[in-house]
Image (cartoon, helix red, strand yellow):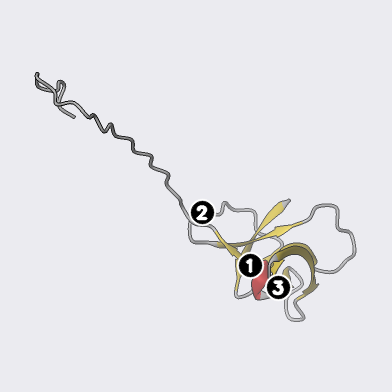
Amino acid sequence: MIIRKVAKQCALLDVDEPISQLHKCAFQFPGDTSGEGGTYLCLATEKVVRFQASLCPKEANRALLNDSSCWTIIGTESVEFSFSTSLACTREPVTPVP
């Protein structure tokens, strides 16, 4: 996959800069030599399919995408907690105190 930066529903074909959180991006399948805008990963209803993009008529370095071909990079965090449900009372203080 080639990760392309997206601006105004267009994949930027000549941009080679990092993409970070909250940026829109598109995932292009490599090896596409059709001369068009390329084939992109797309979510249609509940299926993942390929979307054939077309080149932007005004700018040749952009590919027109549909909304389901654009993805937003977000940050996620995973936190896991555990606790003990002891049935007996402790006679000594719990140390170290959490």
* Disc 1 residue crowd, few under 14, some 14–19, many 20+, Cα 10 Å: many
Asked whether the viewer can see residue 42, the reply is no
Q: Which residue is mark 3?
A: 65
Mark 3 near mark 1, Cβ–Cβ under 8 Å? Answer: yes
Q: Nearer the viewer, residue 56 or 89?
A: 89
| Numbered label attached to residue 70 | 1
Q: Secondary structure at mark 2?
A: loop
Furthest residue toward front: 87
Q: Amino acid at mark 1?
A: Cys
Q: Is residue 80 above or below residue 53?
A: above
Q: Nearer the viewer, residue 90 or 15?
A: 90
Residue 97 point in image, percent of width and height:
15, 26
Q: Residue at x 78, y 74 (%)?
A: 55
Q: Secondary structure at mark 3?
A: loop
Left or right relative to 25: residue 91: left
User: Of the residues under marks 1 and 2, which one precedes in the sequence?
Assistant: 2
- Measured Cα–Cα span from mark 1 to mark 2: 14 Å
Furthest residue toward right: 34
Residue 54 point in image, percent of width and height:
80, 74
Left or right relative to 34: residue 56: left
| Numbered label attached to residue 20 | 2
Q: Residue 69 sits in which quadrant?
A: bottom right
Residue 24 point in image, percent of width and height:
57, 64
User: Of the residues under marks 3 and 2, which one precedes in the sequence?
Assistant: 2
